[in-house]
Image (cartoon, grey):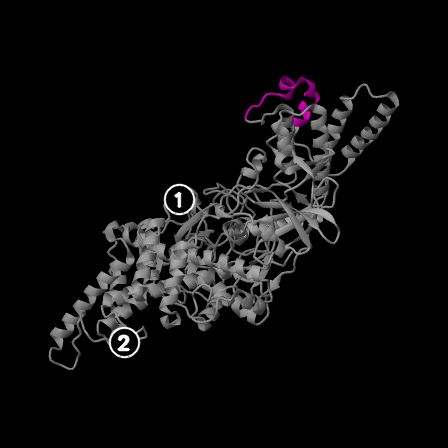
Amino acid sequence: MSSGQRFQPTRWSLVSRATQADAPAARAALDELCRLYWQPLHAFACRAGFSPADADDATQSFLAEFLRRERFGIADPQRGKLRTFLCTAFSNHLRDLNRRVATSARGGAVPHVSLDAEQHDRNSPLDPADPQDPAREFDRAWALATMNAAVARLESALAERGKAGTLAPYRSFLGIDAGGSEDYAATARTLGVSEGAVRVNVCRLRKDFRAALFAVIADTLDDPTEEAIRAEVRALIEALGA
Amino acid sequence: MPDSDYRVAQVRSAFAAALTGDGPAGAWVPPSPEALAPLFPAYEIEALLGRGGMGAVYRARQKSLDRLVAIKLLPFELGVHEDFAERFRREATALARLSHPHIVAVHDFGQADDGHYFMVMEYVAGSDLAARLHAGPVPPDEALAVVRQVCEALEFAHGQGVVHRDIKPGNILLDTQGRVKVTDFGIAQLAGDEPRTALTVTGALLGTPEYVAPEQMRPAAAVDHRADIFSVGVMLYELLTGQLPRGVFRPLAQLVPAARALDRVVTRALQSEPGRRYAGMREMSAELAVCDRRRRPRLPWLAAVLIAAALGGVAVFVWRAPAPPRPALPPAPEPFVNSLGLRLVPAGTPGVFFAAQQTRVQDFEAFAKTAQVWPGDSIYVNYDGTPEGWQTAPLSWGDPGFPQTAMHPVVGVSQLDATAFCEWLTEHERKSRRIGAADFYRLPTDAEWSIAAGLAIDVHDPAGIFIWRGPFPPPPEAGNFAGEELREDERFARYPVIAGRRDAHRFTAPVGAYPPNAHGLHDLGANVSEWLHSDDPGRAQMRGANWWDSAASSLDAGKRRTHPRSMRAFTSGFRIVLVRPSAP
């Protein structure tokens, strides 16, 4: 590793602090982030009344435009969190789309969709329950996407340490899988190891999961202090509880 | 993976647990002897003898043999850290190898049902040398007697390929007869281990700063049995003077005139350069024996002659003896050809096999066909060689903007792509049982790459040396760099190439077009820059110059390029390594 490099940029700080000179790095980082958080944007659009197919198009067009804009000359550390930034930007994008739809096909067969729409699509892959607010739905989907990313990161970290299969028997202990039991004795019997070994592994994996989760979240923050990361975890918990 | 796979409530509690589940490990309270009893039915747990940062020690009676033993317990929270569990295992393994009257014996090792790691050891009734030092400096005769026993124990351990690395008064037990027992092999280095320094990956110091040899403090420096010689030197000085030999320390003769004869021993043991210390414990022992003999001038005449003869004999033997036994070199592992036809060869790091060639277009194609790869819509190109010249172009690894065949190295791939490639190949070859369940592919680490290139592990940037070990510019066979041939492409007409150099490859060269290095690796340091393994979520480094490089600073063997892991450029590719933990 290179020495003397004190500030470790996150993917989002690369984007939000970028100047023209480091546009390449910023663009690559943004590209990666958009790949991870495509689903929340899609959920937002669905909740805002777009059909799944239209939501696909809206998300796609937003990302394409967003990614190609390359306005990295304007460094803006005030952009803060990627989550709030994307939510606002996407909301504006949908308004623009609506406006375009409304002007070009007023009175036609194209459905008029509103961000404050009361209706929501019951065929959405997401939990169709309340809340109906697209922004809240976005946050909720963001939390779930964060979980996905954290689990993927944990799995790849384990694989890199040559422990690819380690997680599977412990998924329910970590809250990754629904169902299953947190029965140490039963798991020990299944795996043919001592209960103590199971306890240690669960404890170890919890620590690893925490590191993975924090790393995933850090990448969406401009200044990922421990406190900022914790605050974001709390915000995501809240989003899930709504 | 669809989100419905996760129940919202569970994700919520997983996040909540992540917020709370990080209490400090210092909260561990050793179980009471009563609480411990059900976990060790074969023993009567008598008393908690003490606890330290690394665990607690109990006195117990082994019922079957009616003997006293010591049970050492690793705090639960530390057992959870693989680093600490590994240290504990290492100590047990080291001790199990060492059956010696001056080394504490280990009887058993394992994990109790409640998750605690434990070790059952020989019980030594008495105290330790640190406690003895509290009472003040030790008379020279006594110090000599103690240190000679320590030397004997370490000479034996070194002969078995074990370096203690944490010799200090607290780790020297003294039984009621004054006999020495060396203990705490928790950070010992075993034969076959890669040499490690005093710093762990997490930056925690292994060993006790006052006693460890200077090389143990240096990152990536080789540490061998001579580190123990240094520590014994520190301990001897402290025993005699009650002070630690820090900085420019005062000679023994000034502080303890009676120990003048030992000055030479201490001075030699404390040389900061390992090569200037004693070559082995046996040599140090012999010199201590000579001092011991000189300190007893009034022994009866006959006894004196006999002892002198015996010790002289030892000394003569020592001077003629070869260096202390070192672990035998393992047999050279066989090269391995993987499912893609890539040859993987040992390249200086045990258990890690380097692909002899850079990953080819055809290899990546096989991956892209079967795995889901985000194709990306552009890669970085640069036709004028200036830092501002980098721009994205709607190209990809399949078409990087210049001609390539299936046998050319793949370029325009990110570190994430390369990592995914390794994961895919691991899974594929594990399924087909071409590699073992514990074997896996990954990108090389910086240190592995340096070793494979024949460089020092900590080669810096810039190193002022080149991969071909001669001056700049590179000789023709050194590899594929940017020579005059590149300017034949009109996009590069004004490109700053290596003056006077012309090779057959305008852009990338087919892999293996240039002679291999000493390990049999082709194109290492040339053709395409190679992504490295990275623990950083956002960034990764590359090593090696590429077909586009022409500046001496770019061709420097120590050069690192740090980029986002997701960056794709027309100059960067990768080389894989196969990790086989069971390989010698």
Instruction: Name the residue type under label 2.
Output: Pro
Determine whether the residue tagged by mark 2 lies in a helix, strand or loop. Answer: helix
Query: Residue B311, image x and y in percent?
Result: 81, 29
Assess disc 1: are there few (<14), some (14-19) or many (≥20) residues with their C-alpha within 10 Å of its C-alpha: few
Query: Residue B16, image x and y in percent?
Result: 38, 59
Q: Nearer the viewer, residue B407 or A131?
A: A131
Q: Earlier in the sequence, mark 2 or mark 1?
A: 1
Subunit under mark 2: A
Q: Nearer the viewer, residue B18 or B347?
A: B18
x 11%, y 80%: residue:
A107
Residue B261 can be seen in this image = yes
Residue B340 can be seen in this image = no
Query: What label does residue A5 carry, if any?
Result: 1
- Looking at the picture, does residue A136 appear above or below residue B111? below
Query: Residue B357, image x and y in percent?
Result: 53, 60
Subunit under mark 1: A
**Image quadrant in which the N terminus of chain B is located:** bottom left
x 86%, y 27%: residue:
B306
Magenta part of the chain:
B247-266
What count of labels does the image hold?
2
User: On the image, numbered disc 2 is attached to which residue?
Assistant: A52
Compute the Cα span from label 2 to label 1. Answer: 45 Å
In magenta segment, residue B255:
yes
